[in-house]
Amino acid sequence: MALSTRSTVLSLYIRVFRIARAWQAQTGAVSDSEAERRYIELEARSLFRQNQQLTDPESIRRCIEECEARIEIGLHYRNPYPRAAYLPPLGLATQRGRRLRAQQRLRKQAKPVYLQSHDDT
């Protein structure tokens, strides 16, 4: 990992934890704020550890873009949880064959950058 990439990743890591430390839930309830802070910290730790061994510059760049997008969306909407992507499951494909595989590939390509680390959406 290049030195500038390493410093970018470390600054994002620090930024996420600073945001988590000062996070206030939209509801204003202390319990909601604590739960959302815990979620931010656990999610950041797990994703950064999961991607710790990446060496491909392109995949590192995509992870950095995803992190920045999730930070901006979370701050804008005051919601730390990932926003849902509204893609109809198997909406345009038949149940088998080539069209199903093509539809699955299109849905995977259409997944927003801030949901790339979530496989279950």
Image (cartoon, rainbow, N blue to C red):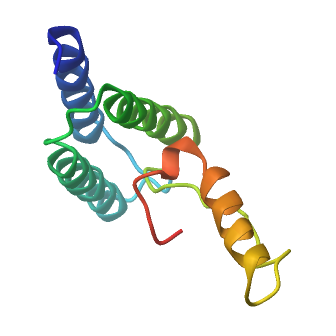
Position of 11 with respect to 110 (left or right) is left
Q: Is residue 35 above or below residue 49?
A: below
Residue 88: which quarter of the image?
Answer: bottom right
| Residue 89 in sight | no
| Residue 100 visible, this angle | yes
Q: Position of residue 35 (x, y in %)?
A: 29, 62
Residue most toward the front?
98
Q: Position of residue 49 (x, y in %)?
A: 14, 48
Seen from the viewer's position, the closer of residues 101 and 12 is 101
Which residue is found at the position 86% from the left and 74% from the top? 92
- Left or right of residue 95, residue 19 in this image: left
What residue is rendered at 14% in x and 10% in y? Answer: 3
Report the number of discs. 0
Question: Residue lying farthest bottom?
Answer: 95
- Residue 93: give x, y in percent of width and height: 82, 78
Q: Say which quadrant the N terminus sits in.
A: top left
Quarter in which the C terminus is drawn: bottom right
Residue 47 position, x and y percent, is 25, 50
